[in-house]
Image: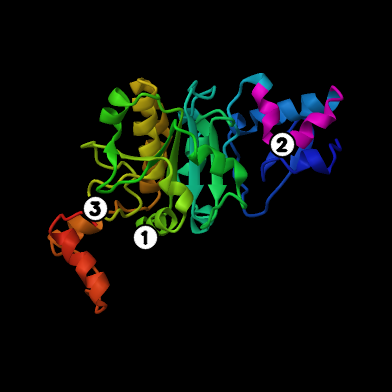
Amino acid sequence: MFLGLELEAYLPSCVQILGLSVFAAFEPEPHCLTCQSWVHQLLWLHESGEASVLTHGLGMFQPLQLREPFPCRPQKVCLCPFLPVHPLHISTHLYIIQHPAEENKVLRTVPLLAACLPKDKCKVKIGRRFSEERDPELSAVCQKSGTLILYPGAEAANLEEFILDSPVYPSTIIIIDGTWSQAKDIFYKNSLFRLPKQVQLKTSISSQYVIRMQPTNSCLSTLECAAVALSILEKNNYIQETLLRPLQALCSFQLQHGAKIRLSKEHLLKNGLYPKPMPKNKRKLRKMELLMNSVKI
């Protein structure tokens, strides 16, 4: 069956369904049919003559109220059973500012987050530098009174306390995705991100993203930050539980297949377990000392 280049561009790397076959030599294992359920929608659109819908990309799934398809994985480690069948209903708009280096990492959390939320509520902007000229949409969002940016610091308000006293209830939250040094660079070198109200999370939970090393015991992944923030803004703890479920499954699968639990750098330093020699660079050495003494950096 020939579907045309536009349609074939959306197919997973390994599909054998309804007479259509696309194979990738490096992925011979069977893949989850849940991953491929959206192919039925593509075929339906093609056969019903709605080819013009294809030009809108993944937006075509919105009328059918199905979540955006997650990248195809072998069936035994498929994450689809841990994702919500339908996108979570939220009123908050989420903007993820992603450092370009994160885009190519295999075990990143943003695709999991995007797979759980409506496409029009979760937008990912990739880059290091943003301005009104480069991104008018983001600039307009940052200038709105109902926009928050989640970034810890002395000037950041506690999110839970802020929404109690804010005259305008927040409608949008911005989260930076990258290592802590990358996030710091993006936050301080883009004046746009100084326009929204800066908030932080006050939580005692430890990160469940145990397959990637965090700087301190209190650091959370981008997905975890979004899960906590959205549950607060939407006043719905179910959101946090739902968003964390695929992350827990991802880490469990990786640990079952040889990955090791990565303790935080703070924990390793405090317990004399850090495997690398202490840096000679004074600035980096100072950071290590602050971590050992549980001082925020």
> Residue 36 is drawn in which quadrant?
top right
Q: Residues within 10 Å of mark 2 (few under 14, many from 20)?
A: few
Dot placed on the residue nearer the N-terminal end, 2 or 1: 2
Q: Do the residues bearing badges 3 and 2 touch, measured as CB atoms within 8 Å?
A: no
Amino acid at the residue labelled 3: Thr
C-alpha span from label 2 to label 1: 34 Å
Residue 57's label in the rendered image is 2
Kind of element beneath mark 1: helix
Residue on which the image places disc 3: 216
Residue 3 falls left or right of residue 30: right
Residue 275 falls left or right of residue 144: left
Amino acid at the residue labelled 2: Gly
Q: Residues within 10 Å of mark 1 (few under 14, many from 20)?
A: few
Residue 6 falls left or right of residue 282: right
> Residue 49: horizontal and vertical position, in percent?
87, 25
Amino acid at the residue labelled 1: Ser
Kind of element beneath mark 2: helix
Q: Residue at x 53, y 23 (%)?
A: 85
> Residue 294: horizontal and vertical position, in percent?
15, 54
Is residue 161 shown above or below 205?
A: above
Q: Residue at x 39, y 22 (%)?
A: 234
Residue 181's label in the rendered image is 1
Q: Residues within 10 Å of mark 3 (few under 14, many from 20)?
A: many
Q: Do the residues bearing badges 2 and 1 touch, measured as CB atoms within 8 Å?
A: no
Q: Residue at x 36, y 28 (%)?
A: 240
Dot placed on the residue nearer the N-terminal end, 3 or 2: 2
Dot placed on the residue nearer the N-terminal end, 1 or 3: 1
> Residue 161: horizontal and vertical position, in percent?
25, 29
Kind of element beneath mark 3: loop
